[in-house]
Image: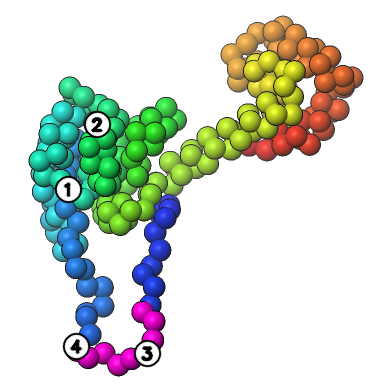
């Protein structure tokens, strides 16, 4: 199931007057969502195009094999939605997304890619993409995402939604640490966050790729700056400040 943000069902019209003409069929669509597909794999582009053309609510209006082609076709065709891969020759999907939205801010861009790395997700969202799905998504999920993005909603696959939540939680935790413990260095705040999660010194060393001795030194500095004598006391102070909840 995809996570959709910002979409609501249309409100029922006010009043109870009788209709003056025949009712519209349930589920009728007044406009077809015009979609440009940008991906460097011909078979994948063709498959997405067929999926879009077999549904009466969507239509494939063009295909691009590179980021540069995606920008040029977007400006010429002005689609409602662009299904964009991240890794393409000539120009990557993030750069193409940013360039397109600079000139066509009304276009909805749905990233459809193999990459689920945090850096890729953050870069795409910062560039202005409305949605992010992995290519392992099924046809129904992709079609639903295209329609939702076309309506102005933000759409994320399950694993991407979890990553975004983790990233936001981590950012909030880091902000809380800075506010509560301004005397600590950035690295000491990272160590305190992991202490608050209940991690041992060896686990902290592996997580931060530090030597055990360096971790011990950081913990000694933290205890001195917070004026605590024991690990349990440091954990209580950290958790009271909102750390250790990720």
How packed is label 3: few (under 14 Cα within 10 Å), some, or many (20 or more)?
Answer: few
* Residue at 54% across, 37% down: 168
Disc 1 + disc 3, Cβ < 8 Å: no
* Residue at 82% across, 26% down: 234
The residue singled out by tag 1 in the image is: 79
The residue singled out by tag 4 in the image is: 22
Mark 4 / mark 3, whichever is N-terminal: 3
User: How many angstroms separate mark 4 from mark 1 (CA)?
Assistant: 32 Å
SS at badge 3? loop
The residue singled out by tag 3 in the image is: 16
* Residue at 22% across, 79% down: 25
Disc 4 + disc 1, Cβ < 8 Å: no
Q: Quadrant of residue 97?
A: top left
SS at badge 4? loop
Please say if 13 is above or below 141.
below
Mark 2 / mark 3, whichever is N-terminal: 3
User: How many angstroms separate mark 2 from mark 3 (CA)?
Assistant: 48 Å
Mark 4 / mark 1, whichever is N-terminal: 4
């Amino acid at each position: 199931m995809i996570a959709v943000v910002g979409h609501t069902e249309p409100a029922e019209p006010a009043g109870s007057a009788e209709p003056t003409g025949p009712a519209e069929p349930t589920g009728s669509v007044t406009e077809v969502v015009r979609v440009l597909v940008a991906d460097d794999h011909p078979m994948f582009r063709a498959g997405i195009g067929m999926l879009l053309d077999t549904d009466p609510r969507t239509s494939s209006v063009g295909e691009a094999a590179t980021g540069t082609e995606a920008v040029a076709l977007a400006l010429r065709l002005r689609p409602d939605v662009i299904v964009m891969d991240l890794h393409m020759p000539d120009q990557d999907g993030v750069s193409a997304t940013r360039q397109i939205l600079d000139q066509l801010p009304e276009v909805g861009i749905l990233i459809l890619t193999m990459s689920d790395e945090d850096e890729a997700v953050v870069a795409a969202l910062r560039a202005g993409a409305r949605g992010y799905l992995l290519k392992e998504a099924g046809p129904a999920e992709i079609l639903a995402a295209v329609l939702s993005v076309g309506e102005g909603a933000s759409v994320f696959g399950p694993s991407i939604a979890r990553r975004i939540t983790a990233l936001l939680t981590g950012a909030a935790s880091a902000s809380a640490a800075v506010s509560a413990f301004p005397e600590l260095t950035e690295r000491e705040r990272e160590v305190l966050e992991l202490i608050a999660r209940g991690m041992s010194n060896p686990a902290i060393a592996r997580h931060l790729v530090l030597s055990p001795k360096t971790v011990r030194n950081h913990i000694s500095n933290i205890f001195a700056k917070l004026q605590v004598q024991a690990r349990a006391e440091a954990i209580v102070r950290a958790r009271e400040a909102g750390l250790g909840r990720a």
